[in-house]
């Protein structure tokens, strides 16, 4: 289908190492050749890069891999299309504005039939069921809360909406509201946290190692979320199906249906 | 203040030549050093690139200048800030979704006091008066038309809203709704059309010439809009203050308050 990559940190961090491995799955070590995209948050805004080329062959992906953009929240996606055609408007991540913040969403799976759900405030630009599901979530959040509610209330609503949509198929997604990174899985998603003492890590998909102790300070905390582990010598935790994981400031703040 | 660059074509065309000159005004031949951005439409979606670096020094701008992205509608902006700080969320062009289409907007000028106008559907992500003005336009269009109206009706409404906002200061803007390129000026904006027979053109801001007859086919039509002429040997027409110019398929379809 597709693969997802996300990052949440307590200090602006570049994602070049993880992206170098992830990008390979878009045509070399994986079959996700139908375009790719990445969103880098800065404050309440975000910068997105999209391309319909396979990430392994994309000049824009090559640029993004080499040019360090530091961010506290990143969401990336490589696409293997099911039905909708390959074009910019069908390329994840998608973005919308709610409460004066940029929301970004990327999906792995399928939710056939979701397009029968009516929408009010947000309309899809492309033809994917993924973008319709994103619009449905934002519609519901907006109708329920005119202003940002407490995190716990928001998390419960998003988990409930995710469960409702997941009944339509497979719904693994990453979403960000410029504060928290949300990860939801029905069958495939995992995460890890990097913190002091930092160690070496080696990519699964490319012949690349990094010694994080040389690029970090002791207080740094970084969470990485991915469809499949990106490194072969670190402890990746599977996300439990049907439970919304929320990450903020480089640590889990909600795991297993309760705020921690 | 800032400078604007727009392009509208009847076939997907790259903007590398014009952007090569325009980019120089962001720090070398012009003082607009406070970030830049560009939007390339593809279908109903768009790809945007933003950077807070001066366009003349930006690695992303260098990439965009060299990598040909073909598009029928392009809007670019180089920024010289007045009040709001330099950050991604204050960097034009801004984008929102309406009627399942991406709308993009960039502004040169100032509209002090516009922020007192209340907004309903769209909220600014950054702190510029420009983004507030964009949200105000989209709010009004959305309230008036639940679905896309005839072009003539839409053009009249946009011109009327632009006039209302222009009373707050100086309001030169480019906007696109994935179909038409809108250009509105209170004091500074000009445009030209390139069509067969194509000739040579030389940039004002860089030592670069191009022979368009070598890169075009006889049916190609391209409109370029800019704050100041980008070339020194072509006929640039000034936009008349207070009149909405609309370009579609590489030609003017509304000039001087009436559809042509």
Image: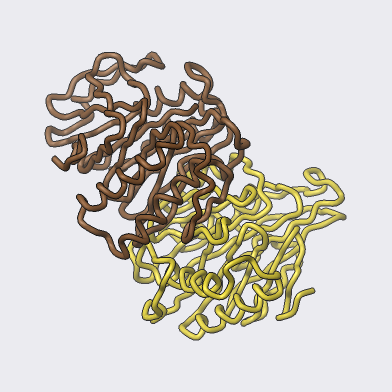
Chain colours: A brown, B yellow
Question: Which residue corresponds to the image point at 75% horizontal and 59% vertical from the top-left?
Answer: B250
- Please provide percent x and percent y for residue A83: 60, 33
Residue B87 visible (yes or no): no
Q: Residue placed farthest to the bottom in the image?
A: B167
Task: Using the image as rendered, state which of residue B222 and residue B61 is in the foreground.
Answer: B222
Task: Using the image as rendered, state which of residue B254 and residue A150 is in the foreground.
Answer: A150
Residue A4 visible (yes or no): yes
- Please provide percent x and percent y for residue A30: 49, 19
Question: Which residue corresponds to the image point at 53% horizontal and 63% vertical from the top-left?
Answer: B105
Whether residue B11 sits left or right of residue B42 in the image: it is right
Task: Using the image as rendered, state which of residue B18 and residue A151 is in the foreground.
Answer: A151
Q: Quadrant of the C terminus of chain A?
A: top left
Whether residue A9 sits left or right of residue A105 in the image: it is left
Residue B45 lies, with reference to residue A203, above or below; the image says: below
Whether residue A163 sits left or right of residue B176 in the image: it is left
- Please provide percent x and percent y for residue A107: 44, 36
Marks counted in the figure total 0
Question: Which residue corresponds to the image point at 39% horizontal and 65% vertical from the top-left?
Answer: B124
- The picture quadrant where one finds residue B239 is bottom right
Residue B193 lies, with reference to residue A104, above or below; the image says: below
């Amino acid at each position: 289908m597709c693969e997802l990559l996300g990052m949440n940190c307590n200090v602006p961090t570049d994602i070049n190492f993880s992206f170098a491995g992830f990008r390979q799955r878009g045509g070399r070590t994986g079959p996700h050749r139908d375009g790719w995209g990445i969103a880098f948050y800065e404050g309440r805004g975000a910068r997105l890069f999209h391309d319909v080329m396979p990430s392994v062959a994309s000049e824009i992906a090559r640029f993004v891999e080499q040019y360090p953009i530091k961010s506290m929240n990143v969401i990336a996606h490589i696409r293997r299309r099911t039905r909708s055609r390959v074009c910019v408007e069908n390329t994840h991540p998608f973005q919308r504005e709610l409460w004066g913040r940029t929301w970004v969403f990327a999906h792995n799976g399928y939710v056939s039939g979701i397009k029968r759900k009516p929408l009010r405030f947000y309309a899809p630009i492309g033809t994917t069921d993924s973008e319709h599901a994103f619009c449905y979530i934002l519609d519901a959040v907006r109708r329920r809360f005119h202003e940002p509610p407490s995190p716990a209330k928001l998390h419960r609503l998003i988990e409930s909406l995710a469960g409702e949509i997941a009944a339509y198929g497979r719904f693994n997604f990453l979403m960000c509201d410029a504060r928290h990174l949300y990860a939801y899985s029905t069958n495939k998603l995992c995460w890890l946290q990097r913190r002091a003492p930092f160690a070496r890590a080696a990519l699964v998909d490319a012949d690349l190692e990094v010694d994080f102790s040389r690029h970090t300070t002791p207080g740094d905390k970084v969470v990485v979320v991915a469809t499949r582990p990106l490194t072969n010598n670190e402890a990746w935790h599977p996300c439990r199906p049907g439970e919304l994981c929320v990450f903020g400031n480089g640590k889990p703040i909600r795991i297993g249906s309760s705020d921690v």
